[in-house]
Image: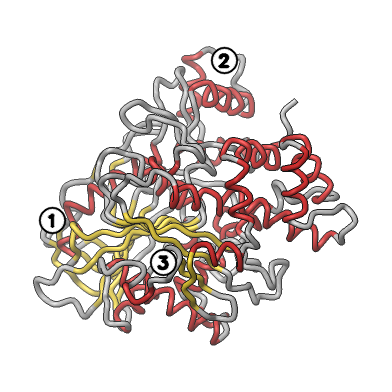
Amino acid sequence: MSSALNHPTLGPLHGLSFPSTTQYRGLPYARFNGRLKEASVHSGPISLAETPYDATQWGPLCPQIPNGIKFDFALAGVELPHNADYKQSEEGGLNVVVTVPKTLKAGEKLPVVVCFWPQGFMDLQNLVDLSVKQGKPVIGVAFNYRLGVLGLLASKELNTAGNYGLKDQVLGFKWLQRHIEGFGGDPSNITAFGESAGAMLLSALLQLSTPLFNRALVMSGSATLRPSKAEHQQEALYNDVIQALDLTSNSTEDRNAELNRLSPDDIISKLPPLVHVGPSIEPGFLDDVVTLNTIASKTKSSWCDEIVIGDCFHDASCFKTRVLNHPNNAEYFINCIDTTLPPNEATSVIKAYNLSPAHPADQSLVDCMELLTDLRWYLPILHTVYDDTESSTKVSRYHFHQTNNFDCQWKGLAAHLFDITLLLQNHRHLLSDEEVGLGEDMVQRFLKYAYGEGFTSEDERVDGGEPVVVWGPNGKTKILGDEEYDDSMRKGRGKLLRGLGWEACENLANALQFGIKK
């Protein structure tokens, strides 16, 4: 069933009607100006009075690797039910979905929440529905943006610094400033939140000098996971792409022509499934590489009022096929630790994570996963919270410990992306009452945050440290002091890793993930 809106700047729209919300899909927010080129914001009307825009159908996704959405949904442990019929388009992929409560009153301006998820998790209809039921209605917004090589490739030969996907997102926020008020949203009250790759990109946006949003919820990802690449790194990646496309013997002019002639499928299908693309250092846009040593100052943006950061206890489950897939994980990890750290420190780490080649493979997998999670997810949180104390930006934190109950390899673990499944409630029928209840509690706290009421309240202050929100296990939410949390829930490992120094931890994480440098 469709619902009509006479939008003051976009023109008349037909949206898709749900019991408590209306969703406007496939709205163009930017104009595609060509492959490997910056887009421009879509500023004018998209419809005429006599021909309303049909916003009842999903817009196409930006091109991505085959089965990319399937992979996203499978990270929760099982392949969650999803619409597998999404179309893809370079020209039409820069579109947005806006979900609006039907309870909206004339002249009302609601808080706006903008999500950056893996692209299979774009539907905020249930989240907005819950916001209505909980008495804190919000407007939900989800952007499509360019991904992978087509969104980030850079080279001198291309005469571009890349970053197209990031700049698409910047255009999305510019579009919001022009048009969200026509949906009943408040352009001065925007909360951005993202998970995994979305959190990495959100972390990059926080480095920009241009104000984009008021609050950020950075979930299971940071700029240290996929740091901005220097020129020589982008050139090396570009050469790998050219070689994979069999264009090394072509002239520069012919290569550029061929890169623009090939279809997205032709390019993506010839590349390895996991190409380590990332943002580029670009003076005036992204100026530096973010390390554990600099993440606090780069994340605590002067224009963002409050930041919430957090992780899942077993976030490194997403590295199963790329890192945690050795015949003997413990043996490989111990070798990396012994090679990277001094003997006493190496022994302390091996003991703290109970690593032994003699342990069963399943046990070693979890032990190694916890070390990699702490290095790549937990430690950046600690550096963000404790470093750069002169910043005025308020930083809060959470940690997700609710264990996955699906019949899958991650059953019993707080795996990567399982928190999305609870927060968005898009698969509510597959969840237990315990999981549904925890998800609703997560939503309630997030909505208070989006309303500017803070992630934690004054009555949740704790003695002896800053409050830490802990979601799970057993469907419970609790508030712990930061030291109590590290001692009781992480076995003091955060303190141990911080004591090694940021550079040693970064070197160890790189060795585990990419191999020991020879």
In the rendering, which numbered label is found on residue 9?
1
| 46 or 506, nearer to the observer | 506
Q: Residues within 10 Å of mark 3 (few under 14, many from 20)?
A: many
Residue at figure coordinates x 78%, y 38% from the top left: 343
Query: Disc 2 marks which residue?
Result: 250
Q: Earlier in the sequence, mark 3 or mark 2?
A: 3
Query: Disc 3 marks which residue?
Result: 123
Residue at figure coordinates x 31%, y 28% from the top left: 284
Q: Nearer the viewer, mark 3 or mark 1?
A: 3
Q: Give the amino acid at mark 3.
A: Asp
| 413 or 19, nearer to the observer | 413
Secondary structure at numbered mark 3: loop
Cα separation, mark 3 vs mark 1, equals 24 Å
Q: Give the amino acid at mark 1.
A: Thr
Report the quarter where the N terminus lies.
bottom left
Secondary structure at numbered mark 2: loop
Residue at figure coordinates x 20%, y 69% from the top left: 110
Secondary structure at numbered mark 1: loop
Q: Are marks 3 and 1 in contact (CB under 8 Å)?
A: no
Where residue 374 appears, as percent x and y from the top left, is: 61, 53
Q: Are marks 3 and 2 in contact (CB under 8 Å)?
A: no
Left or right position of 349 against 416: right
Q: Earlier in the sequence, mark 3 or mark 1?
A: 1
Q: Earlier in the sequence, mark 2 or mark 1?
A: 1
Where residue 62 appears, as percent x and y from the top left, is: 44, 48
